[in-house]
Amino acid sequence: MPGRTARSLANRGVPDLTAVAPQEQALVGSGSALQRTSVPIYHTPYWSVFTLTLAAVCLDSWLVPTLNTVAPIFSSGLLLILALRRSCLRPPSAPSTTPPLALWRLFGFLSQHLLLIGAGTAFGDILNGHHSRGFALALAASKYLILAPTAILLSRAEWRDCGRLYRAECIAASIALLTFFPLRIFNMAWPWYGQILGRSVFALAHFFVPGTKYLAALTPTLIGPNLEVTIVFGCGGLQAIKLFQILFALLLVVDWNELNGGRAVTVYFGGLAVMLIANVFRITLLFVMGNTSWRQHVIEYHLSAGWILLTLVFVTYLGMTYRWMLKEVKG
């Protein structure tokens, strides 16, 4: 009895190693998972430059709403993510080639962004005012200067090395910068593009709805026996393009290392055209169905039905082009 008591007292407060072992393994597993996640980041060359750019652009847009332009945020974020995706191809033991950023470069980078914030605050009324078409386009282009301070972070030689290393990623980010959600372009083109859209819908619809009339105006109107459809700016296809760009960007992020860059660019611009054509058929279908007994359903559900149709068009188009975009596997 004394021996048992001594052993129980000696073991009191000492954890059972067999019970602790699984917990230790779980902690070690979570640590290794975190390490595996952090390795691609720190082994991605120039990751700090891309991260600083994205963070500064987001901060500027948040502090000064007049500088809020979606394209620079989208393109800089896409460049960072695609660079991280490329780093997955590097062996885990590969040393990092990220050059250290000099303090004077960081100070210059932050100073230029502070100047941009001050300028955006001071000239906010001008940036938000109504101007002629050419001056408004120039002001819209000036908002892209929000990316200019990034140039000071690296030397010319380092920028050349970065361009060689991330040539495909830079092309993808540049295309996103110039084409993502082209609101200004649509605004400028609407007077003549709206007429092309309206007449295209009329050319298709009058075969199915006899007596259809077309009223030319800044917002074209199709007049049918039971329903009139006015094509406003919001129906011009800009949202269809935005939907395609977001879904296509997700595809790039997931399959970037398996895609042929040149073919992906071709599929991208082809997809923009397909979505604009699909928008013509969407409006035509709504007009034709609205002049039948389905008129009330069209009025109630035409927005939801439009999004479903455009999503189906994207899935169909991707199914037809996806395999062609992939890199050829050399046997």
Image (cartoon, helix red, strand yellow):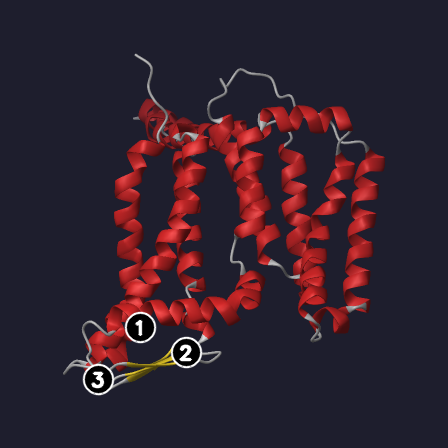
Label ID, residue 202: 1
The one nearer the camera, 219 or 162, is 219
Residue 128 placed where, x, y %?
70, 72
Give the vertical position of 183 relative to 316 (above or below). Answer: below
The one nearer the camera, 195 or 72, is 195
Q: Amino acid at mark 1?
A: Phe
- Quadrant the C terminus occupies: top left
Residue sitting at x 25%, y 48%: 316
The one nearer the camera, 229 or 7, is 229
How crowded is the residue under tag 1: few (<14 C-alpha within 10 Å), some, or many (20+)?
A: many
- Dot 2 falls on a residue whose secondary structure is loop
Residue wearing tag 2: 220
Label ID, residue 213: none
Marks 2 and 3, the one that precedes in the sequence: 2
Determine the CA span between mark 2 and mark 1.
10 Å
Residue sitting at x 29%, y 47%: 317
Residue wearing tag 3: 296
Q: Amino acid at mark 2?
A: Pro
Q: Is residue 197 left or right of residue 82?
A: left
Give the vertical position of 66 relative to 161 (above or below). Answer: below
Q: Amino acid at mark 3?
A: Gln
- Residue 247 in view of the camera: no
Q: Which circle, 1 or 3, is nearer the viewer?
A: 1
Residue sitting at x 38%, y 48%: 271
Give the vertical position of 286 relative to 239 (above or below). Answer: below
- Dot 1 falls on a residue whose secondary structure is helix
